[in-house]
Amino acid sequence: MRAVTVDRAAPGGLMLSSVDEPVPSASETLVRVAAISLNLGEVRRARAAADGWRPGWDFAGTVERAAGDGSGPPQGARVVGMRDEGAWAELVTVPSARLAALPASVTFERAATLPVAGLTALYALEKRGLLIERRVLITGASGGVGMFAMQLARLSGAHVTALVHREEKRALAAAHADAVRVGDGADLMGDAKTFDVILESVGGNVFANALRLLAADGLLVTYGTSADRNSTIEVAPFYVRGGAKVYGFYLFYELQRQPAGAGLARLAALLDAGKLDVHIDTVLPVAKIGEAVELLWNRAITGKLVVTF
């Protein structure tokens, strides 16, 4: 079968290779993959990995062989799921707890955007509890997680402010937020407004500014550093707020507490009901995987990038 592997000499550092078909254990389901979506974290990891390593987290497809122990969806079921690595392949094995069945209205392309981006948004927002009438700031709002987070926060009754890094991203964010700002968040401090919840994924100056925008007892959830992995902060304005907290969110750690399958089923149901929208910037065939990763790495994507088998 075909799978994407790291190859330094190939465009984007990735190529399609012929590999052995996987053999599922009794508690695993074998899925024929129809679509995958790309995330910055796995692309960053692929760029540092040795030749031959197989990247990939998100996928959607059809159950080729049901789990032998009876857990998970039956053969022929349309599903969405995620792996720790190796999902960019024609066939994948996956523990049943990391799968969810898809409603008929949800396409494979739309479903493939849900695992990492959707679950990060869903589980990160839940760290603050009820969001009714809470003020929420989403940085990196035009990215995959940001697009889901804005919608989920508003569905939960929050007042949402989106922060995007370029003016051309404003209009898309405005469709899902109560207010949109462009830049690194410094101008928000002039409003004398603070936020109960901040989802932060940019790093650098954006992270430092976001800390100063937390309300008393506010929570900043940091889950990425798309622009800058280093940040210099002024400590006093943070602690004098009183009760403010920073939570380091790593999805694969969170999945030890909350199974992926349960969250994916919730997100798929929202898509089916028309309460959640997916913005897919670009769809490419897997033969163009090198081009796809370069687009994502250069921040040329708004929302999600999907690749099909």
Image (cartoon, rainbow, N blue to C red):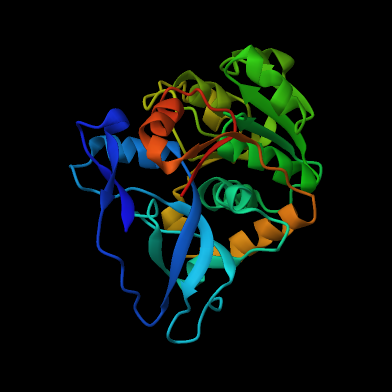
Residue name at image x 70 percent, y 36 percent? 136
The answer to whether one can see residue 305 in this image is yes
Residue 127 in the image: state x and y as whole percent: 60, 51
Depicted 277 relative to depicted 12: above or below: below
Residue name at image x 65 percent, y 53 percent? 107
Where residue 47 sits, quadrant-wise, is: top left
- Is 96 left, or right, of 170 in this rendering? left
Nearer to the camera, 29 or 275: 29
Residue 232 in the image: state x and y as whole percent: 40, 20
- Is 246 left, or right, of 232 in this rendering? right
Nearer to the camera, 168 or 239: 168
Residue 92 in the image: state x and y as whole percent: 39, 63
Depicted 169 relative to depicted 104: above or below: above
Depicted 121 relative to depicted 280: above or below: below
- Is 100 left, or right, of 308 in this rendering? right
Residue 260 in the image: state x and y as whole percent: 52, 62
- Is 221 left, or right, of 203 in this rendering? right
Nearer to the camera, 218 or 179: 179
Depicted 138 relative to depicted 109: above or below: above
The answer to whether one can see residue 255 in this image is no
Residue name at image x 63 percent, y 32 percent? 138
Where residue 185 sits, quadrant-wise, is: top right
Q: Identify the image quadrant of the N terminus.
A: bottom left
Q: How many numbered badges does the structure rendering display?
A: 0
